[in-house]
Image: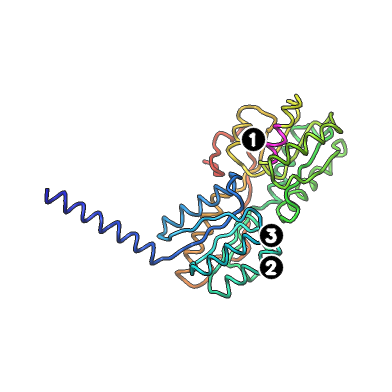
Amino acid sequence: MKRTLLTGLLLSVITLSLATQAAEKGLIVIITPSHDNPFFKAEANGAAQKAKALGYSTLVASHDDDVNKQNQLIETAIARKAKAIVLDNAGADATVGSVQKAKDAGIPTFLIDREINKTGVAVAQIVSNNYQGAQLGAEKFVNLLNGKGDYVELLGKESDTNAGVRSQGYHDVLDDYSDMKMVAQQSANWSQTEAFSRMETILQKNPNIVGVISGNDTMALGAEAALKAAGKTNVVVVGFDGSDYVRDAIINNGNIKATVLQPGWAQAQMAIEQADYYLIHGKAQKEEKQLMDCVLIDDANASKLETFNLAH
């Protein structure tokens, strides 16, 4: 009985010690777009997991691509004297001021997924090589269509630099194929619902399309749903992100035949590791601008993909 009581007391002391250690290391605030998008949810989860493993407490929040909400969340981080902020931002230009405000308050920011249009404000900007990834996706798209036919492009949110970079990467490949013609190009703002409605309208005017290339997986899923509703089971769709939902579509031989994995989970964990290094050493671990290469996902490797991470 005494031994059991002593063991319980010892465990309580260890638990209290770990909690105190976490409190001593301080708070890291993790802010991303909406967790309705599995990519952003994976970012948040990956960052929170790593932060807790390193002994930090966390505050995880979403700005929903609303700059005002993002500003309020960064104000909250400042008010709570956060040790660092990990941020997937709500606008390349609109975010600069709030990141500068955090810096002025002594709080370093580590950006993931999306860059801002200024250097020297954030400690790190860790992003996927969207141009390289888009070229991988476009090359696969060409192969799937045998280099010919009418196709549609669904663009992401126009204020997001990734949308433009991915589109440019696509077209630097696709525009070399004279037998391929883009008959429609519309923004669906990264949204599955908007992509569904856009595709419905596009199909009414262009019933003979053979392919859809999408700026992200969420829009690819919306496009696929619209195509299935219209009985267009042979129209090829290629996405970008590497979500588990699209993985399943590829494995199950749906309209979606390929996607491009951007390593969101790894980026988020890397940002936490670099924040920890900065807080310990008082300097950046790496250069501010950091690019991570993307990987093509198709029927050859889709089964190895889980939570935006590819098992090797």
Identify the mark at residue 118; answer none if there is no mark.
2
Q: Which one is nearer the viewer's eye here, 152 or 199? A: 199
Please indicate whether residue 62 sits to the left or right of residue 240 in the image: left
Give the quarter of the image for residue 290: bottom right
The reply to whether the C-beta atoms of the residues labelled 1 and 3 are less than 8 Å apart is: no
The stretch in magenta equals 219-225
The amino acid sitting under disc 1 is Asp
Task: First in sequence, mark 2 or 1: give its number.
Answer: 2
Taking the image as shown, residue 241 lies to the left or right of residue 199, namely left
- Residue beneath disc 3: 91
Q: Give neighbour class at mark 3: few <14, some 14-19, many 20+ (Cα, 10 Å).
A: many
Q: Residue at x 58, y 48 (%)?
A: 35
The reply, left or right, for residue 231 in relation to residue 175 is left
Q: Nearer the viewer, residue 244 or 310?
A: 244
Does the magenta portion include 221?
yes
Label 1 to label 3, Cα distance in Å?
A: 31 Å
Q: Position of residue 168 (x, y in %)?
A: 78, 50
Q: Which callout, 1 or 3, points at the residue further toward the start of the chain? A: 3
Residue 130's place in the image compared with 146, above or below, is below
In terms of secondary structure, where does tag 2 sit?
loop
Instruction: Determine the image quadrant of residue 126.
Output: bottom right
Q: Residue 199 colored magenta?
A: no
| Picture quadrant where residue 242 is located | top right
The answer to which of marks 2 and 3 sits earlier in the sequence is 3
Closest to the camera, between mark 2 and mark 1, is: 2
Say few, some or many: other residues with alpha carbon within 10 Å of mark 2 (under 14 / 14 to 19 / 20 or more): few
**Circle 3: element type:** loop
Please state the horizontal and vertical placement of residue 165, each as a whole percent of the image.
Answer: 74, 53
